Amino acid sequence: MIASAPDVDAMADAIAAGSPRALARGLTWVETGGPRAEALCARLYPRGGRAHVIGITGSPGGGKSTLVRALARVARARDRHVGIIAVDPSSPFSGGAILGDRIRMNDLALDPGVFIRSMATRGALGGLARATADAVDLMDAAGWDPIFVETVGVGQDEVDVMRLAETVIVVSVPGLGDDVQALKAGILEIADVHVVNKADRDGADRTQSDLRSMLHLLPHAEGAWLPPILPTVAAREEGIDAVVAALDAHRAALAASGDGEARRRRNARARVLQIAQGLLADAMTHGDGGEPAALVEDVARRALAPHAAARMLLTMARAPGLSPAGTPRSREDGT
Amino acid sequence: MIASAPDVDAMADAIAAGSPRALARGLTWVETGGPRAEALCARLYPRGGRAHVIGITGSPGGGKSTLVRALARVARARDRHVGIIAVDPSSPFSGGAILGDRIRMNDLALDPGVFIRSMATRGALGGLARATADAVDLMDAAGWDPIFVETVGVGQDEVDVMRLAETVIVVSVPGLGDDVQALKAGILEIADVHVVNKADRDGADRTQSDLRSMLHLLPHAEGAWLPPILPTVAAREEGIDAVVAALDAHRAALAASGDGEARRRRNARARVLQIAQGLLADAMTHGDGGEPAALVEDVARRALAPHAAARMLLTMARAPGLSPAGTPRSREDGT
């Protein structure tokens, strides 16, 4: 069942009023995706735009969760309400599920000034990046600020997720081989702040100088923000203040230079495109009447050229069966 | 200038008749993309479907080009006309450019029974996978068979490109760390044939047994093709016959089991979706009249919800300005 417009209005109002229970339910809606989530987001999107959204990515085992926990504690000491979204594209768990790393956040989970959510929405309509961006919007509209978005890995999914952040922290650890560094290139390019965590380990200086060399290879416009490289030992809360200062400085620099404006546009462009591409993928997978399947069949037996089929798919993705008025599929009824 | 229909017809006929010069020009068309390429592909697509399309991917430095060269020599000895497409998503070179690895293919390049093409079409309308798939169709319609499609890296682009192959070879080399193996997981899953190249190196047995362990972790349906793990020293042409036999056996197994049918459908689905998503990306980047830019602006200042903007973009991607009748942009005039 699709929620009626009054239901969506009531939910939007409750979320905007700051109800954590409403937020939790709304996040389940956006995790599932579909018309109900789209309607909810449409109502809450205009109310957001205030929170500092901070992405944290890097290699598995780099201590990202520990770093987020330490940063969240500083924000709490400033009396801010902290949102945390932990994104795991490969996990079958979702919603309220507590992932391994999350358990170590338990001290924060007891604090009503911290809202923690795991997202593991493989198969969500429109994809993981769509769902995560919508989740950030809901938290933002509900007044959580800052919002930390942490990913577990270093793949394309993670890069897409990071596009929704205002500030991106890339966490490195000493001792990674050159091969891995090279593969991480796509991630390094999106860093606004580099953190070398576990900096008490052997090779931390080397990792910092490697990062510095790599930064020199990236294009850098005159006067643009230069990502600092900051050593931390997050488990002992060492070096955290410098990271917090860098986050604040980055936000201030974006506002002062106009780069923040450009970034908002860039992120909006990427997001609109992702949603539209997700609608296509959903039309292909869940399209009614077997139409996409017939298209594919015709292409496979060479009775229809792939380009012509693609143009037909664009039409199908806009068809009523998949518009907000329709019912693409429902993976749950209530919650 | 968009080529007129008679021009496209003449080009299609010349390619189908086997003119290497026409094929080279047609490949430049599809590299650029746009209406002219789309029209050409529409005419040639029904004439293809015969070639054995073999994808080769794996870590950089694994000796993929050397392996392709060795496999091409065997095919030439069988009097087949061999097509080779070398795909480098990160390279700024394209068209007739000779990349580093290509130079080592020079002995083959002098053989009129071998057609070699480098594709490096970052920025091509519709993306690299679209352009590569179209290039394969042209070669296929021109009678080149087998067609080897070799990629340089192991990213998502490469996985997308591999989706157009009937048989995928993944090349591993001894001595890769566990981290890299894990990152390659997405590639390993698409392998039909595993080659451990440079098998005279220390650790080759270990690499083979690691691969075997990993294969056991992947789902495997009763009676389905089980990817063999084959050691080679491609530079000395050792182990090549076993790889050729595996390629033939895989093709025969696909035909016998009906899995080939399923794979053609799966590949067609992925390709149609990719083209449609590429049309969206092109509409966003090259859309006429500033409409997509205005959408993005409205989303960035929160006057329009991203989902609503995405639905508008779907309409724009179908607008005449970007349909086959229109003129999205022209990066070249003749050739």
Image: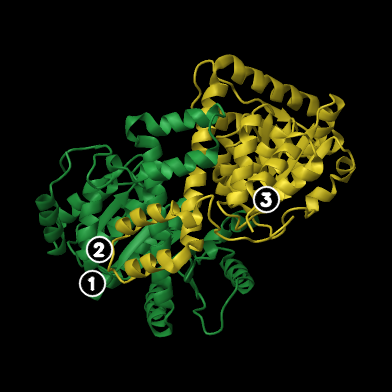
Chain colours: A yellow, B green
Q: B202 or B215: nearer the eye?
A: B215
Q: Residue B80, which numbered label?
A: 1
Q: Position of residue B37 (x, y in %)?
A: 24, 50
Report the disc number at residue B45.
2
Secondary structure of the residue carrying tag 3 is helix
Q: Secondary structure at mark 1?
A: loop
Q: Crowdedness of circle 3 by 10 Å Cα count: few (<14), some, many (20+)?
A: many
Q: Please state which amino acid type lies under the numbered disc 3.
A: Trp
Total numbered labels placed on residues in the image: 3
Residue at the spot x=53%, y=42% of the render? B307
Are labels 1 and 3 assigned to the same chain? Answer: no
Residue B236 as seen in the image, left or right of residue A5: left
Q: Nearer the viewer, residue A239 or B65?
A: A239
- Give the crowd class for mark 2: few <14, some 14-19, many >=20 residues within 10 Å: many
Label 1, label 3: how far apart the Cα atoms are: 56 Å
Asked if the residue under mark 3 is in contact with the one under mark 1, i.e. CB atoms within 8 Å, the reply is no
B238 and A292: which is toward the camera: A292
Front: mark 1 or 2: 2
Pick the quarter of the image with the C terminus of chain B. Answer: top left
Q: Is residue B70 visible?
A: yes
User: Numbered disc 1: what chain?
Assistant: B
Relative image position of residue A15 (x, y in whole percent): 74, 39
Q: Is residue B175 above or below residue B289?
A: below
* Residue B125, quarter of picture: top left
Q: Which residue is at 30% across, 50% downward?
A: B118
- Amino acid type assigned to the residue bearing label 2 in the image: Tyr
Type of residue at label 1?
A: Arg
